[in-house]
Amino acid sequence: MKSFADVIDRNIKIIGADPLTQRGFTQIPNVILKSNNLTGGAKLAYTMLLTYAMGDDECFPGQDRLGADMGTTRQSANKYIKELESKGFINIKRRGQGRSNLYEINLRAKVLKSAR
C-alpha cells in the first residue's frame, strides 16, 4: 500500500536548514489562511500565537511584543486579538494587573468549520 506522501503530487520541496529555517517555522490550518471571515492581520496574529505556543500548548505574550513581532502597533495587535476571540478562534484568560493574558488557541474542528 502506498503512503499518502507517495500519492500526492508535490510542488514544493524543502531541503535542509538554512538561515531562514534554522529558527523553525510555523504551520497553520489552511482553513485559517483561506478564511473570508478573518482579516490578514488576524491571520498573522493567529500565526504568531501558534508560534509562541509551540511546545507549550499555551502562550502569554504581551501585546507590545505581539505588535512588534507582527510589525504593527500594540493597538492593531489588540484589535486582531479581539477579532480572533469574537470569532471563537482563541480564548483569552486575563491573569491580573501587570501580567500578560493567557491565550488558548482553538483547534477543534467545530471552530474551524465555522471559518469557512
Image (cartoon, grey):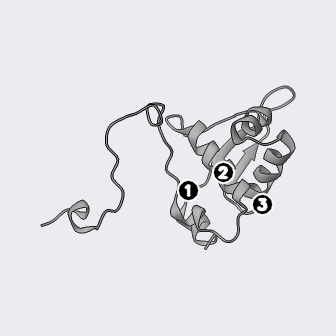
Residue occupying image coordinates x 57% and y 40%: 51
Query: For residue 107, which numbered disc appears in the image?
Result: 1
Give the mark, 3 or 1, whose residue is nearer the N terminus: 3
**Mark 2 lies on residue:** 44
Residue linked to disc 3: 86
Q: Is residue 54 above or below residue 87?
A: above
Give x and y (percent) for residue 16.
Answer: 32, 37
Q: Amino acid at mark 2?
A: Leu
**Of callouts 2 and 3, the N-terminal one:** 2
- Measuring from the top left, give residue 84's x and y in whole percent: 73, 56
Q: CA distance from mark 1 to mark 2?
A: 16 Å
Q: What kind of element bears circle 3?
A: helix
Give the camera-side residue of 69 and 113.
69
Q: Are marks 1 and 2 in contact (CB under 8 Å)?
A: no
- Looking at the image, how many numbered discs can be counted on the residues? 3
> Is residue 100 left or right of 57 when viewed as pictured?
right
Residue positioned most to the top: 98
Dividing the picture into quarters, in which one does residue 52 lie?
top right
18 relative to 46 in the view: left or right = left
How far apart are the alpha carbons under marks 2 and 3? 16 Å
Bin the neighbour count of mark 2 within 10 Å (Cα to Cα): few under 14, some 14-19, many 20 and up: some
Q: Position of residue 116 (x, y in %)?
A: 61, 74
Q: Quadrant of the N terminus?
A: bottom left
Q: Is residue 103 left or right of residue 19?
A: right
Residue 67 is situated, as x and y percent measured from the top left of the image, at 76, 39
Q: Amino acid at mark 1?
A: Leu
Residue positioned 29% across, 67% down in the render:
9
Residue at screen point 79% across, 45% down: 77
